[in-house]
Image: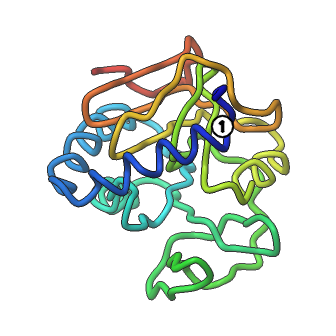
């Protein structure tokens, strides 16, 4: 059987379902430590975070630290995609079990950094997600591509190219044990490992 995106997604989902309950707090803390070092900056940043689902890295600790000095946004589902809204409490559980902040009339089209959960990553550092295409559609609406960090609780990477041309690509892919990056830099960010 040849490797396709759907075959790779199923393989990664099996791996995640098998392992996400084992040491999730420890694995999340390892990713959070790396993420904290990466996000240290002297300037105020506009950052898109996500609110974690069960199989995703729990990045809430970093989110709460970063919101003190930065503009933090989270996804708010709109039709087949989402828009960014400022992170504020209370959050409500919505479609697919995702927690969202209240809707906002702000039309935010520029961010410095996007932290994105993944199911798997291919040889071009492109994202394999749940298959709904929400992040792909969202990134297509942005005026400029932000510095993108993929995070995952388990390393599920293939050297093969299985993604489509429209699938978003990361600048850094973080897991508890591995770290992949491209050569792109954003001014003010630390690249301490």
Answer left or right for 164 relative to 185.
Answer: right
Q: Position of residue 34 (x, y in %)?
A: 28, 34
Single out the residue that lies furthest toward the top.
183
Q: Residue at x 68, y 82 (%)?
A: 103
Answer left or right for 28 relative to 161.
Answer: left
**Image coloring type:** rainbow
Q: Position of residue 63 (x, y in %)?
A: 37, 58
The residue nearer to you, when weighing 21 against 91, is 21
Q: Residue at x 81, y 68 (%)?
A: 80
Which residue is denoted by mark 1 in the rendering? 146
The residue nearer to you, when weighing 98 against 112, is 98
Total numbered badges shown on the rendered structure: 1
The residue nearer to you, when weighing 77 against 101, is 77
Answer left or right for 188 relative to 60.
Answer: right
Single out the residue that lies furthest toward the front.
1
Which type of secondary structure does the marked residue at label 1 adopt? loop
Q: Which image quarter is the N terminus in?
A: top right
Answer left or right for 80 relative to 97.
Answer: right
Q: Is residue 2 above or below residue 22?
A: above
Q: Position of residue 99 (x, y in %)?
A: 50, 78
Q: Position of residue 65 (x, y in %)?
A: 30, 56
Q: Is residue 165 above or below residue 99?
A: above
Q: Residue at x 36, y 23 (%)?
A: 179
Quadrant in the rendering for residue 166: top right
Q: Which image quarter is the C terminus in?
A: top left
Q: Is residue 70 above or below residue 183?
A: below
Q: Residue at x 62, y 82 (%)?
A: 95
Q: Residues within 10 Å of mark 1 (few under 14, many from 20)?
A: many
């Amino acid at each position: 059987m040849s490797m396709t995106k759907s075959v790779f997604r199923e393989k990664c989902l099996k791996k995640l379902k098998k392992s996400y309950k084992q040491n999730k707090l420890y694995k999340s803390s390892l990713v959070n430590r790396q993420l904290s070092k990466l996000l240290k900056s002297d300037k105020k940043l506009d950052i898109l975070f996500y609110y974690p689902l069960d199989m995703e890295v729990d990045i809430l600790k970093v989110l709460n630290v970063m919101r003190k000095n930065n503009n933090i946004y989270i996804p708010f589902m709109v039709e087949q995609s989402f828009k960014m809204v400022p992170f504020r409490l209370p959050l409500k559980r919505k479609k697919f079990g995702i927690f969202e902040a209240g809707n906002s009339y702000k039309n935010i089209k520029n961010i410095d950094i996007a932290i994105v959960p993944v199911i798997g990553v291919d040889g071009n550092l492109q994202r394999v997600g749940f298959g709904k295409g929400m992040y792909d559609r969202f990134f297509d609406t942005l005026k400029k591509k932000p510095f993108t960090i993929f995070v995952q609780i388990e390393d599920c990477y293939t050297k093969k190219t299985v993604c489509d041309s429209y699938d978003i690509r990361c600048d850094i892919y973080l897991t508890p044990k591995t770290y992949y990056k491209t050569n792109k830099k954003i001014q003010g960010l630390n690249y301490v490992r």
